[in-house]
Image (cartoon, grey):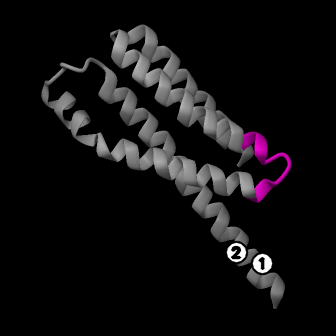
Amino acid sequence: MRAHILLTGILILAAGISAMFILPKMPGFEFLRGGLTLGGALLICGIFTFSMYWHGIIGAGIVSLIGTGKGLMGIKGVADWFTGDRSRGIAPLLELGITILCVVLLLRVLKALQAERTRRMLEAN
């Protein structure tokens, strides 16, 4: 789980940095800021799992929930891109990729938390 959190953070950081070179100046800076914020938060959560494992995982779940919500708000841009409106360039596809990364991480965190809950319930009996 720790490796998945760290890898997701690195991929989001890489998407933000690559947007600087792919997109025009201002949208590129917006993606860089978002990538540094979201990816950096996930990296911090991943590093935090080394000292307090479950706190880092729960933090990564919350950060990925925020990233998922933000990505789902921009899903109309992806639909517009697929129908032919390319006014924003490749930005909607980058948003879709980051949203998918956040959704997968969120689902894995929920699965890990549910497994831990089940383990603790069985251990209590």
In the rendered structure, are the residues bearing label 1 and label 2 in contact, judged by CB atoms less than 8 Å apart?
yes
Pointer 1: what residue?
120
In the rendered view, does 120 fall on the left or right side of 82?
A: right
Q: Residues within 10 Å of mark 2 (few under 14, many from 20)?
A: few
From the viewer's side, name the closer residue of 89 and 123: 89
In the rendered image, the residue lying farthest to the right is: 51
Q: Residues within 10 Å of mark 1 (few under 14, many from 20)?
A: few
In magenta, the rendered stretch is: 46-54
In the rendered view of the protein, which quadrant contains the C terminus? bottom right
What residue sits 66% from the left and 61% below the top? 112
On the image, which quarter does residue 110 sit in?
bottom right
Residue drawn at (72%, 69%), measured in percent from left and top?
116
Q: Amino acid at mark 1?
A: Arg
Reading the image, the residue beneath label 2 is 117
Q: Which mark is residue 106?
A: none
* Residue at figure coordinates x 76%, y 75% from the top left: 119
Kindly identify the residue that appears in the image at 47 percent across and 44 percent down: 67
Tell me the SS state at disc 2: helix
Q: Is residue 51 magenta?
A: yes
Is 63 on the left-hand or right-hand side of 70?
right
Res 94 quadrant in image: top left
Image location (x, y in percent) of residue 23: 35, 13
In the rendered image, residue 108, in percent from the top left (x then y), is placed at 59, 55
Extreme residue toward the bottom, this view: 125
Front residue (pair 37, 109):
37
